[in-house]
Image: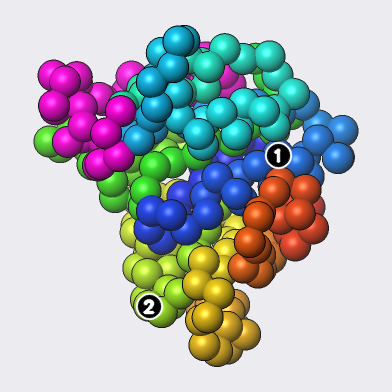
Amino acid sequence: MKKIFITGTDTDVGKTLVSIALLQLARESNLTTAAIKPVAAGCNKSTDGLRNDDALALQSMITASLAYDEINPIALEPAIAPHIAANNIACEISARYLASQCDQIFQKNNDFTLIEGAGGWRVPLNATETLADLAVLLKIPVVLVVGLKLGCINHALLTFDAIKNDGLVVSGWVANQVDKNMAAVDENIETLVQRLPCPFLGHIPFLNNPSAIHASKFLDIKKLLV
C-alpha cells in the first residue's frame, strides 16, 4: 500500500490539481485509491453541512466509497489560516487527532492513499503544532508541489529543507505553473531539477480550465510507485 502526503510551497499552488491528477493516474494503473483532506478552510454551507471544493474534488476521484466527513474531518468556513478559523469557533485542532482520522482511512488498505495538506508546510494547527507535525506522526513520504511564479526557487528550496529537517523523505516534486506570464520557466525548472535531490514528477503548464485528466498527462506516477 502506497501512502503519500501532498504539500506545497504556498497556498494556491495547485496541490489539489496535482492530487487529483495523481489519483487519475493511479486509477489508470488499476490501483484502488483513497484520499484525505484532514483540514480545510474556506468551506461552503450546504444542506449536508460545510463542504470544501478541494475535498469534494478528491472524493470524486477516488475508487473507495468514503463519506465526506471521512475525507475532510475538520471543515472550517472562513477562508483564513486554519488555526485562526478554529479559534473563532472555539475548536481545538491537534495533529494527533488528525493522524487518528488518517489511520482509519489507511486501515481500509487501498493501494494508493493520498493526504492533501493545507497551505504550505508550516501552516499552524494550534498554538504549538503545524500541519508538518501531522506528516511527521504519519511517517510517510512527501510530494512537494512548486507553484511556478517569481520567487518559487527560494520557496521550493526552503520547503524541501524544512521537510528534510523534520526527518521525512521527499519522494518527488511537481512544477505547476500558476503564473501564465512567468519569465524563464524552463530555466527555473532546470535550476530546481539540479538543486532538489528527489525525482522530478513533471511540469504542468498553465491551464485555463484544468482537469484531472488533462493535468495527469504531464505527470509520471511510476516514480512514486517504486
Q: Which residues are magenta?
A: 77-106
Task: Specify which label sits upstream in the sequence, 1 or 2.
Answer: 1
Residue neighbourhood size for the residue with mark 1, other residues' Cα within 10 Å, grouped as few (<14), some (14–19), many (≥20): many
Name the residue type under label 2: Gly
Camera-nearest residue between 94 and 216? 216
Above or below residue 19? Residue 171 is below
Q: Position of residue 175 (x, y in %)?
A: 58, 67
Q: Is residue 99 visible?
A: no
Q: Position of residue 193 (x, y in %)?
A: 59, 77
Q: Determine which residue is flagged by label 1.
A: 23
Name the residue type under label 1: Leu
Q: Is residue 50 visible?
A: yes
Residue beneath the point at 28% across and 46% down: 123
Q: Secondary structure at mark 2?
A: loop
The reply to whether the magenta stretch includes residue 82 is yes
Q: Horizontally, is 131 left or right of 81 in the view?
A: right
Residue 106: numbered disc: none
Q: Position of residue 210 (x, y in %)?
A: 66, 54
Q: Secondary structure at mark 1?
A: helix
Residue beneath the point at 45% across and 23% down: 51
Colour approach in the figure? rainbow
